[in-house]
Image (spheres, rainbow, N blue to C red):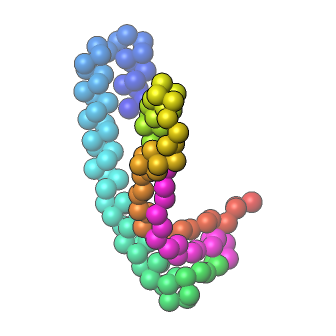
Amino acid sequence: MQNIYQLWQAGELANEQALEELCQALDTLQDRLQPLQESEQVLRAQISEVVERLGGRAELAGFGSLNITGASVTSHYDRRGLDKLVERLRDEGQADLAAEIASYRQESARSGGLRISRSKQT
């Protein structure tokens, strides 16, 4: 991969050829990573079940702390919407700011899951 990029930077590979070879390398890498990612998901699910049985928290010497986090909902505001609102309110001289701001509130759910904090290796 790096060699392809270096050849391209040096002008020894055409843009299209470099792009094709880099994308093929990415495909190959992703194909090799997928089984590892699936194994990681299985292990994390198994670890979660054990940690849950231990009350949702565990400390493992030489590894770190493990916690089961609860599901939550996060809120944020649409910046562009607020910018438009502020501009419009300035132009119109209106004071219903609170009601308008509330209409731009967006929520997204965040599922709970296993959180692993690794020990620092010295």
Question: Which residue is found at the position 41% from the left and 57% from the top?
Answer: 108
Question: Which residue is found at the position 39% from the left and 18% from the top?
Answer: 7
Q: Is residue 87 above or below residue 12?
A: below
Which percent across, then down, holds residue 80?
Answer: 44, 34
- Dividing the picture into quadrants, the one containing residue 5 is top left
Which percent across, then down, holds residue 38?
Answer: 33, 64
Q: Nearer the viewer, residue 30 or 106?
A: 106
The quadrant of the image that shows the N terminus is: top left
Q: How many marks?
A: 0
Instruction: State the extent of the magenta-drawn residues as a range.
Output: 61-76
Q: Nearer the viewer, residue 38 or 55?
A: 55
Question: Magenta includes 75?
Answer: yes
Which percent across, then down, holds residue 18?
Answer: 30, 22
Q: Is residue 69 above or below residue 94?
A: below
Q: Is residue 112 above or below residue 98?
A: below
Q: Is residue 2 above or below residue 66?
A: above
Residue 4 appears in the picture as rendered: yes
Residue 101 appears in the picture as rendered: no
Outermost top residue: 11
Q: Is residue 61 left or right of residue 51?
A: right
The quadrant of the image that shows the C terminus is: bottom right
Question: Which residue is found at the position 52% from the left and 72% from the top?
Answer: 69
Q: Nearer the viewer, residue 15 or 44?
A: 44
Q: Is residue 70 left or right of residue 21?
A: right
Which percent across, then down, holds residue 6?
Answer: 43, 21
The overriding secondary structure of the stretch rendered in magenta is strand
Question: Which residue is found at the position 42% from the left and 12% from the top?
Answer: 10
- Dividing the picture into quadrants, the one containing residue 64 is bottom right
